[in-house]
Image (cartoon, rainbow, N blue to C red):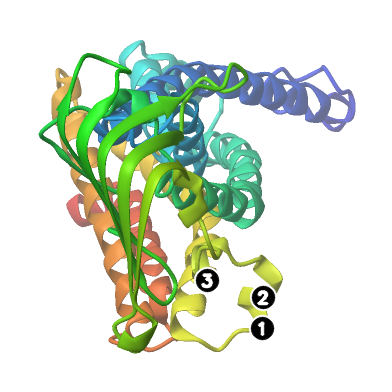
């Protein structure tokens, strides 16, 4: 017997080298079974989220308040921002699907007969989840703040730029921050001259009111969107609320107006655009909440993958809906708890410690309880 144990392939079940190779094959097989639905689910969630993000700004784009290219860029940036949430839920569902399918096909039973314990399956899932968690951590720490920064800049510029060709009569056009209002009384067709035009712009220290009898867009062959307009018989009022003596009135027979002239300043500071190094040094509650969110996303990825293990166990003749319903409810509750804890920390309603870590700790306890429940139930019956 000692001789057989010393031979690598002598014992097909307990031989060391053969056993290591068998575990490696099982790990690769499980990884493949999880990766396939992961790619499909993540692609589907990404497409749905991209259309959702785009739908919110389609009205502004159609009205000329946002160029189409800006709309597409903002949708892509929003999708990049959401990946640290979409990837964990996609992994969670893919593990649930893969192990549920293996259980329904009795493949997990066959693995158990060969000596592959549930701990070996959990180790294989954990190894793949660690790789995904690293990617999620990098996205959350570096790609997400960059995407937020770019989206803020694009949104800021979009608040001051428009395609005047697309403006229609009888509609009040207001920029996203409310600093600009445009109204046209009458217009002959798309891109034609407008009559009786009113424009109000809120600048840094005063308001500018423009009334014009006629306005015609000035087309630039190098720019698809027209933001320059020629005003005829225009009256411009510069109003300074804090210094009325500086008020001015200007009458002009012809005046060229650029809609981008109001784009002054830069977007204000927000924790979501701050670098990881800045957040680590900050003591502000909002910065700490953002830091805890970024650090929690890879941990959530691992915990959700492990939570799918006990949830994938199905009773005989149990439907998939009965298995997925509690899984979806658990994830919904966890996401709401994370979001609420982040808000509580941000506004000082929850101490910095434990802070947002309450949510991952709760999920870890739920996962541990569900994993140990079958063994406890068997011991109680015994």
The location of residue 66, given as percent across then percent down, is 38, 35
- Within 10 angstroms of label 3, few (less than 14), some, or many (20 or more) residues? few
Task: Describe the element under mark 1 as helix, strand or loop.
Answer: helix
User: Mark 3 vs mark 2: which is more N-terminal?
Assistant: 3
Number of marks drawn: 3
The location of residue 220, given as percent across then percent down, is 56, 22
The location of residue 360, given as percent across then percent down, is 41, 64
Task: Describe the element under mark 3 as helix, strand or loop.
Answer: loop
- The residue carrying mark 1 is 281
Question: To which quarter of the image does residue 213 belong?
Answer: top left
Pick the front one: 169 or 52: 169
Pick the front one: 198 or 163: 198
Position of the N terminus, as image quadrant, is: top right
The location of residue 301, given as percent across then percent down, is 49, 47
Q: Is residue 111 visible?
A: yes
Q: Residue 182 vs residue 7: left or right?
A: left
- The residue carrying mark 2 is 278
**CB-based contact (under 8 Å), mark 2 and mark 1:** yes
Q: CA distance from mark 3 to mark 2?
A: 12 Å
- Residue at 20% x, 17% y: name it: 188
Extreme-top residue of the structure: 105
Question: To which quarter of the image does residue 276 belong?
Answer: bottom right
- The residue carrying mark 3 is 269
- Residue at 52% x, 71% y: name it: 269
- Residue at 18% x, 50% y: name it: 381
- Residue at 50% x, 21% y: name it: 219
Q: Residue 131 vs residue 112: left or right?
A: right
- Within 10 angstroms of label 1, few (less than 14), some, or many (20 or more) residues? few
Q: CA distance from mark 1 to mark 3?
A: 16 Å
Task: Describe the element under mark 2 as helix, strand or loop.
Answer: helix
């Amino acid at each position: 017997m000692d001789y057989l144990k010393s031979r690598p392939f002598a014992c097909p079940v307990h031989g060391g080298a053969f056993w290591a190779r068998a575990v490696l094959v099982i790990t690769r097989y499980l990884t493949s079974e999880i990766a396939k639905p992961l790619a499909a689910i993540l692609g589907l969630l990404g497409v749905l989220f991209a259309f959702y993000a785009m739908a919110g700004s389609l009205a502004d784009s159609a009205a000329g308040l946002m160029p189409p290219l800006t709309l597409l860029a903002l949708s892509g940036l929003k999708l990049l921002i959401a990946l640290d949430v979409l990837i964990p839920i996609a992994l969670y569902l893919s593990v649930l699907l893969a192990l549920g399918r293996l259980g329904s096909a009795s493949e997990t039973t066959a693995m158990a007969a060969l000596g592959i314990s549930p701990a070996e399956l959990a180790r294989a899932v954990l190894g793949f989840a660690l790789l995904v968690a690293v990617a999620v951590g990098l996205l959350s720490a570096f790609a997400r703040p960059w995407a937020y920064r770019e989206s803020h800049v694009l949104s800021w510029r979009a608040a001051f730029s428009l395609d005047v060709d697309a403006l229609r009569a009888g509609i009040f056009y207001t920029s996203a921050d409310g600093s600009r209002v445009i109204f046209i009384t009458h217009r002959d067709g798309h891109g034609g001259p407008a009559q009786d035009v009113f424009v109000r712009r809120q600048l840094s220290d005063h308001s500018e009111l423009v009334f014009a009898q006629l306005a015609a867009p000035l087309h630039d062959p190098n720019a698809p969107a027209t933001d320059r307009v020629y005003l005829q018989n225009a009256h411009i009022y510069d109003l300074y609320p804090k210094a009325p003596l500086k008020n001015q009135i200007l009458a002009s027979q012809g005046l060229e107006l650029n809609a981008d002239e109001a784009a002054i300043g830069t977007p204000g500071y927000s924790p979501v655009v701050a670098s990881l190094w800045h957040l680590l040094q900050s003591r502000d509650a909002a910065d700490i909440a953002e830091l805890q969110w970024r650090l929690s996303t890879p941990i959530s990825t691992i915990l959700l993958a492990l939570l799918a293990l006990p949830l994938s166990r199905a009773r005989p003749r149990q439907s998939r809906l009965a298995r997925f319903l509690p899984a979806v409810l658990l994830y919904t509750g966890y996401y709401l708890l994370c979001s609420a804890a982040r808000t509580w920390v941000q506004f000082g309603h929850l101490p910095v410690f434990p802070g947002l870590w309450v949510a991952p700790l709760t999920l870890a306890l739920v996962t541990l309880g569900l994993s140990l429940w079958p063994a406890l139930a068997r011991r109680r019956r015994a």
